[in-house]
Image: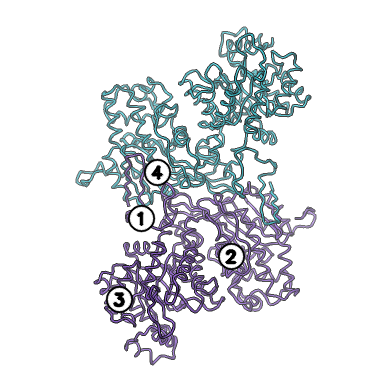
Chain colours: A cyan, B purple
Amino acid sequence: MVNQVERGDGTCQCKSDSSGASNSGGDSSKESSRCSTPVLDAYRSDRLRDKMRRRMESGDRWFSLEFFPPRTASGAVNLISRFDRMGSGGPLFIDITWHPAGDPGSDKETSSMMIASTAVNYCGLESILHLTCCNQSKEKITGYLAKAKHLGLKNIMALRGDPIGEDWEEEEDGFNYAIDLVKHIRSEFDDYFDICVAGYPTGHPEAESYEADLRHLKEKVDAGADFVITQLFFRPDTFLKFLDDCRAIGITCPILPGIFPIQGYQSLRQLVKLSKLEVPEEITQVIEPIKDNDAAIRNYGIQQAVEMCRVLLDSGKVPGVHFYTLNREVATMEVLRQLGLWIEDPRRPLPWAVSAHPKRKVEDVRPIFWASRPKSYIYRTQDWDDFPNGRWGNSSSPAFGELNDYYLFYLKSKSSKDALLQMWGEELQNEESVFEVFTCYITAQPNRCGHKVMCLPWNDEPLAPETNLLKDELEKVNRRGVLTINSQPNINGKPSTDPIVGWGPPGGYVFQKAYLEFFTSSENVTALLKVLKKYEPRVNYHIVNVNGRNLTNAPEMQPNAVTWGIFAGREIVQPTVVDPVSFMYWKDEAFALWIEQWGKLYEDESPSRMIIKYIHDNYFLVNLVDNDFPLENCLWQVIDDMFELLDAPPELHSEETV
Amino acid sequence: MVNQVERGDGTCQCKSDSSGASNSGGDSSKESSRCSTPVLDAYRSDRLRDKMRRRMESGDRWFSLEFFPPRTASGAVNLISRFDRMGSGGPLFIDITWHPAGDPGSDKETSSMMIASTAVNYCGLESILHLTCCNQSKEKITGYLAKAKHLGLKNIMALRGDPIGEDWEEEEDGFNYAIDLVKHIRSEFDDYFDICVAGYPTGHPEAESYEADLRHLKEKVDAGADFVITQLFFRPDTFLKFLDDCRAIGITCPILPGIFPIQGYQSLRQLVKLSKLEVPEEITQVIEPIKDNDAAIRNYGIQQAVEMCRVLLDSGKVPGVHFYTLNREVATMEVLRQLGLWIEDPRRPLPWAVSAHPKRKVEDVRPIFWASRPKSYIYRTQDWDDFPNGRWGNSSSPAFGELNDYYLFYLKSKSSKDALLQMWGEELQNEESVFEVFTCYITAQPNRCGHKVMCLPWNDEPLAPETNLLKDELEKVNRRGVLTINSQPNINGKPSTDPIVGWGPPGGYVFQKAYLEFFTSSENVTALLKVLKKYEPRVNYHIVNVNGRNLTNAPEMQPNAVTWGIFAGREIVQPTVVDPVSFMYWKDEAFALWIEQWGKLYEDESPSRMIIKYIHDNYFLVNLVDNDFPLENCLWQVIDDMFELLDAPPELHSEETV
């Protein structure tokens, strides 16, 4: 890549890359004469159609995933975890169907609108929201679109939807077909949204003819649609013929095949009925005999989908494949793995998951405290006008949203109350029972009742691979009441492609300062403070109790960068900081989780509840940073020294206490 | 240091340090609820009186230096180099006398105002501007003060000055005494300026009595002066008695002794006459016999000053000593060295000299191009409203001032035309003569006429110690027409206290990417571009000719950080970047220096002039960054490969040229 920059008149022109593409997104205007590009991933803020174009140019095939909104709040919690798991395989986008019966445009946790917003904002997934226009007023549709835009959604799948009742008739001036919606979006929102429309490889069941339906598709595209996703089909030739026919009549935009891996006999029957498709005989012949054997049908479905996708991709005419997941993950993931499209180790652009909300496109620094609760961080900062970029200290929006107890990600665990009681103890005897829960979580060993502790209020997932590097030390200290909730090892210049600690583009180097965060008793803190004097100025600490009493040696309360990376041709990136100011907001949340997630499992006034409350009221939350990242991490020695001091004969203690 | 931060009401309070000082500077208000402190040196923006207070609290004694404005422009150039040399010893401040006969408030290069502004803005020295009020209108004085404020001066030495003519009388409502000026400054500029006043250890010669003069001093301090510097004296007891007398009548501010190291018989006689002081007999007895032996008198002066300062400092009552330098450096530096006050290796807060202009207090990133011409950089960015902080990409003031030929630092060399001709050649034979000049500069060997090449148009000083690390390689490539003007080695985590490459507070680690910048022929560039393909993406390059034709592989034209540091409890600091946009501004300057400094030494149309013009018109300016800082610097290999390609038989060359 060689950029030519001519400058004859005293001004300088910057050219982004050899593709010659200009970023035409509405909110990506240049603030000044300088090139204002996000540092690590210049394409992060691209619109979906530009991402597709770039992938097609580079011959880099993609997949995408369709989901429908869940029925219940706990279904929503599960679907969001599924987004995270399936998002990790690297879909180019996902889409969320519009569920007219489910109050789809509302603020309910289960609405299409909210699920799509969650996917974009909290899971960082490029998302398309379906929208059906049949029987809807223009005002209503405009309202949905405005809301979607406000929530950071940038893509709409424009559909007619099923008419209500048998006696549907065209309304003059109303939305009768998807094309009306496409035109409406373009007329009301100009070029803001990328628009997808549906294609029917065998023709829409209500169309006069296959040819007439092709012409309708051409009209939808001409009206402003950016690309097409097709209805499911069972034979690759069906799609390839359709594709050729589309091209023949001048449809030039991307046309993506909709793939339906058969996952069960009943779901196939149901879908076929809804879509008015016929299952080819070669398939019926195979599955009818095994219709009661779910596993066999699923295996067949996987094989059939893989073969079909191979034919499509090998044709050279299909840049990406779209999956109807039915909100399940196993079959689709298996198909994608066999096709080699599933990205086993997706490159992380930053050490934390980047939100796909356009407002956050420049965000590249966060406090380390929410490392295990990134969705909570996004939620509490959703009203910020600016996001820190380059340096945390530059943030002009320091106010974190208040603690609330209702929100999906906020204080709820995705496990049921029963599961939590099994993991964290039906009954606690004393503080040591709590230490034991932490220790079992760290060691991944079953607790005394035989249940594995898969999560803690501060960690909704099992231990991260990176934290596993510290497992032995963590176990030791948790046993003695240093209740760790966050930690990272020091890293002195590992390649950015390191499978455990790497992030950012290849060819770079990543660094970390060792970090440890834990709850511990005030007795321990008294000893710790004495010990920490020996580690000045190497170790920075912040020690705070629930009332906000805060002890620190942080110089002038500045943020301390604890994760940073050096990349070719880039400024330094420092995505994670220990920020003294935001630690006070995190503290509220971290202490609240004791009561809200753990204490409330037990009856009011029960001994178990009182033990949790005692910890909440009396323990301190401590964080420690070892600034000397090239040396061996000294934080374990700090804790050892603290234990040694506590174990020493009493005359060695002074009288002071915290 | 333990900071306590209480937070009960949802807000957070930050406390800067244990001294409990609040920064009361007019322009240091907090922009938001966050602690907004410069990253590396929180005290950099402190006002002088706060710096003094902090040094007194810590028992850290200081020195300061007085200079007078020069008579000629070349005297100004010399004085400014002296500021740099004497500034490197770590004075707490310098002061510039007000020279009523020299148009002191004008924009002349030699005016008191401009010299003080230069010391602050370009040399980064905390400076006090003297101001005399006698025979001046209030409007005129207010104008001077407003101008001083505008230029970034923050401290005024308020003096009466000598009345013009014998028949001076007090004017009603006029400025009759220094106290009138002190009051005027406070009434017109509130607390903006720190004010210094003069003290007379033996009483002002015109005062009614010693006691009356003490009372006048008390009145000046009560009127708003922040500290006192005394007239010179010859015996330490004179000062110590005066100090006690001041304290006795309630003067509590710092009182700094003015030290005059005797430097010659005539200058002593003259000064004594002006100040109406008597030289004590013990001194007269020593110097009268040696009055024609300058060296002997100077040695005596040094010893006498050292002894006097020792008594003063040992008294425990003197926090700092002020030197009347008479614009000379040897004697004062020697006294300071013997006292142990001269800082041999001052810690650099950043790898480049920080300007003391309050507007630039947050500046902590600069392009590497002006590394050897920092004053030119400051000059060309003086109209910026904001300075880059944390990340270069954040700069909102990208416009560099235009190239001008008149300014002191801009295109002028501090050497005379004759000296330059001796160094760079009375007559050039061909391009190789130019290569030889560069080579002699690098090797510090005399040229063929026996003259050492001490500077080049792009480097006004001999090779920096850091560049010396690369000396052998630099010599080799310059001999062959790779005319290097800027370079740095790669550094992978050296201590911040490293004497050659260190900067910033102790306990940190500094890093660099290898950098090389040179002029070379288009033939060489053609070969270089082929070679560079092998080094993608490890090496970033920018290659530009005088017309602005620019070849680069920089990703999206982003800045590349080439110097950064990691410090305890701080965000990452990246003080030096290779910025593609500012490179185009630097290019104009770098090419102009060929003609303005070198070519114009020769007659129009002379062969020597034509050779320089040929290089100016046809060579390219190249910069290279090796991004792989942990590995051995590959830039020398790049140049070797280029030479190898050039040396290869012609069939290996392709036909393309730049």
Q: Is residue B629 visible?
A: no
What's the distance in space between the residues labelled 2 and 4, CA to CA?
48 Å
Circles 2 and 3 in contact, beta carbons < 8 Å: no
Q: Is residue B454 visible?
A: yes
What's the distance in space between the residues labelled 3 and 4, CA to CA?
49 Å
* In this picture, residue B55 sits left or right of residue B571: left
Viewer-side residue, A159 vs B41: A159
For label 2, the SS is helix
Q: Residue at x 62, y 35 (%)?
A: A47
Name the image quarter holding residue B18.
Answer: bottom left
Q: Position of residue B549 (x, y in %)?
A: 71, 55
Q: Amino acid at mark 1?
A: Ser
Q: Amino acid at mark 2?
A: Lys
Which subunit holds the residue at mark 3? Answer: B
For mark 3, what is the residue? B311
**Of callouts 1 and 2, which one flags the residue occurring earlier in the amino acid sequence?**
1
Viewer-side residue, A64 vs B538: A64
Q: Is residue B653 above or below residue A581?
A: below
